[in-house]
Image: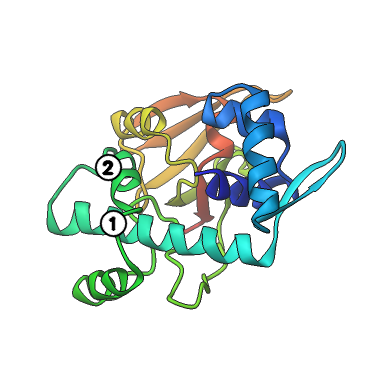
Amino acid sequence: MYLKVIYNLEAKTGVARTGDIAKILQITPGSVTNTLEVLETKGLVAREPYKGVKLTDQGRKLALSVFRRHRLAERLLTDALHLDWTESHEEACKLEHAISDSLASSIEKALGNPKICPHGNPIPDEHGFTEPTKGESLSGLGNGEKAMVIQIPDENTDLLRYLATLGMHPGVRIEVEEKAPFNGPMLVKVGSTSYPLSLDVAEGIYVNRNP
């Protein structure tokens, strides 16, 4: 879990800070510091005083392996077992540690070699390669612009359930009807209904313009 969180924070801000890790994992900064010390001794992270931590090559390789098993588990749960896409993340967290590399490859083949998870996040191949994300944050769109939702990087179950109530998921077309100034909320049309979205939520939804 630590390696996945650090990987995501690095991708977003270039470095993972102790406070950010603690907030995401909902634990104390002291607990994070202790675990980071252990990960550093194992050669998985490198710490920079007053800056944060970054994954080493070994740590990044392990993180991508976990992402691969996790996202393939999500696809198995939704595609084969028909679990709702909003619930697949938590269940996959339990399964990812029990799936071997060989079983992951078997799942991948059985599912037709999927490239993304149900939330639109790329599934690393067996060598750790992932296709770069080609979308952009919904928060960057202006009034009247149309787009298609392609990715929800933050697989927080509460967030996914909320977006599901709006009918907003990868593959859905949307339109920005109004964007308030000074980092205000956005009014986004999904189907025939319009919903207000906070800028924080909009920043975590990736889209392709003018699909």
Q: Amino acid at mark 2?
A: Glu
In the rendered structure, are the residues bearing label 1 and label 2 in contact, judged by CB atoms less than 8 Å apart? yes
The quarter of the picture where residue 83 lies is top left
Binning the other alpha carbons within 10 Å of mark 2 as few (below 14), some (14 to 19) or many (20 upward) gives some
Identify the residue shown where x is 21% and y is 52%.
Answer: 78
Image vertical order of residue 134 relative to residue 48, above or below:
below
Query: Dot 2 corresponds to which residue?
Result: 91
Q: Position of residue 94 (x, y in %)?
A: 30, 44
Mark 1 falls on what kind of element? helix
Query: Dot 1 corresponds to which residue?
Result: 73
Left or right, 38 with respect to 144, comes to: right
Q: Nearer the viewer, residue 150 or 161?
A: 161
Residue, far left: 81
Left or right, 50 with respect to 87, comes to: right
Does the rendering let one see residue 199?
A: no
Mark 2 falls on what kind of element? helix
Mark 1 or mark 2: name the one nearer the start of the chain. Answer: 1
Q: Amino acid at mark 1?
A: Ala
Identify the residue shown where x is 32% and y is 30%.
Answer: 161
Q: Position of residue 28 (x, y in %)?
A: 61, 21
The quarter of the picture where residue 156 lies is top left
Q: Nearer the viewer, residue 62 or 136?
A: 62
Q: Position of residue 37 (x, y in %)?
A: 70, 42
Q: Nearer the viewer, residue 152 or 182?
A: 152
Q: Nearer the viewer, residue 78 or 67?
A: 67
Does the rendering let one see residue 130?
A: yes
